[in-house]
Image: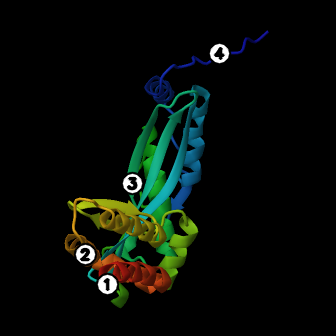
């Protein structure tokens, strides 16, 4: 009778990773790169290779994160793949972040963006598991030397086109822009929506209004300063939800003139 070979069961994530790496697993290079006339390991092959680590209790998850930065009326997007390596039965994890950079930095082409995402996910997985990789192109995410690059007008303006906005929405609707409210003492509080920011600002006004150590003049000046230092985000609130903005300003005016 053939005896079943028992797999040594590790007790820590690093021990499990060490056992997996000692197996010498490599992703098979089955896809063709017509530009470099070579083969490379696709994302599917990389996932198949790293899944061999499941017998040691290792698993992974990948999430595409992004944040939208507004600066001088221009919108910029910072995007990355976050890979988390987990060990079964433990809270121990390893995390890596790999930037997503489309070919020629063109963000208004969903195909190029998709290629860059695949490229980043593949290399992030190979890196965190430590399996062999080849210096390939993600099949499309590279620049041919003979190709000249002319940025689009939208790129010059630092704005996203509707195509890019659609792609970002499909990728992860749970990652909205970050809205920052500056509080007294130059402290910052970040919000994932303008609605929650408005609640915070309302609470801030109530705290100032009910402060027993300030007279009314000081309270009015403090609230006016809060509006001024947060002018940009308050303008965003006004454009997005004028009723909420009007409620805040009306509450302040009633206190000021009451």
Coloration mode: rainbow
Whole-number angstrom distance, CA of label 3 to CA of label 4: 36 Å
Q: Which residue is mark 1?
A: 257
Residue 88: x, y in percent?
57, 29
Task: Kindly indicate whether the residue at mark 4 contacts the one at mark 3 (C-beta within 8 angstroms).
Answer: no
Toward the bottom, the furthest residue is: 153
Q: Secondary structure at mark 1?
A: helix
Q: Nearer the viewer, mark 3 or mark 1?
A: 1
Q: Nearer the viewer, mark 3 or mark 4?
A: 3
Residue in view at x 46 percent, y 23 percent: 15
Residue 247: x, y in percent?
45, 80
Q: Nearer the viewer, mark 4 or mark 1?
A: 1
Q: Which residue is mark 3?
A: 98
Q: Quadrant of the N terminus?
A: top right
Toward the right, the furthest residue is: 1
Q: Is residue 14 above or below residue 201?
A: above
Whole-number angstrom distance, CA of label 4 to CA of label 1: 80 Å
Sequence order check, earlier mark of 3 and 4: 4
Q: Which residue is mark 4?
A: 6
Residue in view at x 24 percent, y 72 percent: 216
Sequence order check, earlier mark of 2 and 4: 4
Sequence order check, earlier mark of 1 and 2: 2
Label 4 crowd bin: few (<14), some (14–19), many (20+), radius 10 Å: few
Whole-number angstrom distance, CA of label 2 to CA of label 3: 47 Å
Whole-number angstrom distance, CA of label 2 to CA of label 4: 74 Å
Residue in view at x 43 percent, y 71 percent: 198
Label ID, residue 114:
none
């Amino acid at each position: 009778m053939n005896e079943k070979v028992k797999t040594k069961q590790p007790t820590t994530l690093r021990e499990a990773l060490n056992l997996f790496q000692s197996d010498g697993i490599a992703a098979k290079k089955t896809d063709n790169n017509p530009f470099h006339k070579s083969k490379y390991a696709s994302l599917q092959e990389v996932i198949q290779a790293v899944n061999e680590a499941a017998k040691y209790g290792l698993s992974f998850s990948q999430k595409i994160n992004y944040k939208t930065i507004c600066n001088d009326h221009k919108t910029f997007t910072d995007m990355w793949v976050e890979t988390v390596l987990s060990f079964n039965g433990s809270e121990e994890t390893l995390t890596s972040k790999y930037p997503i950079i489309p070919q020629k930095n063109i963000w208004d082409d969903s195909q190029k963006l998709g290629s860059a995402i695949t490229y980043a996910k593949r290399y992030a997985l190979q890196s965190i598991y430590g399996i062999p990789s080849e210096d390939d192109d993600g099949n499309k995410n590279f620049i041919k030397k003979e190709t000249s690059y002319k940025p689009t007008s939208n790129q010059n303006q630092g704005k996203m086109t509707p195509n890019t906005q659609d792609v970002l929405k499909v990728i992860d609707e749970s990652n909205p822009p970050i809205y920052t409210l500056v509080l007294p003492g130059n402290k910052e509080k970040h919000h994932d929506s303008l609605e929650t920011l408005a609640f915070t600002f309302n609470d801030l006004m109530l705290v100032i209004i009910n402060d027993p150590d300030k007279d009314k003049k000081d309270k009015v000046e403090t609230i006016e300063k809060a509006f001024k230092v947060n002018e940009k985000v308050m303008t965003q609130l006004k454009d997005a939800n004028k009723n909420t903005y009007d409620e805040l300003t009306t509450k302040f005016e009633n206190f000021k003139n009451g």
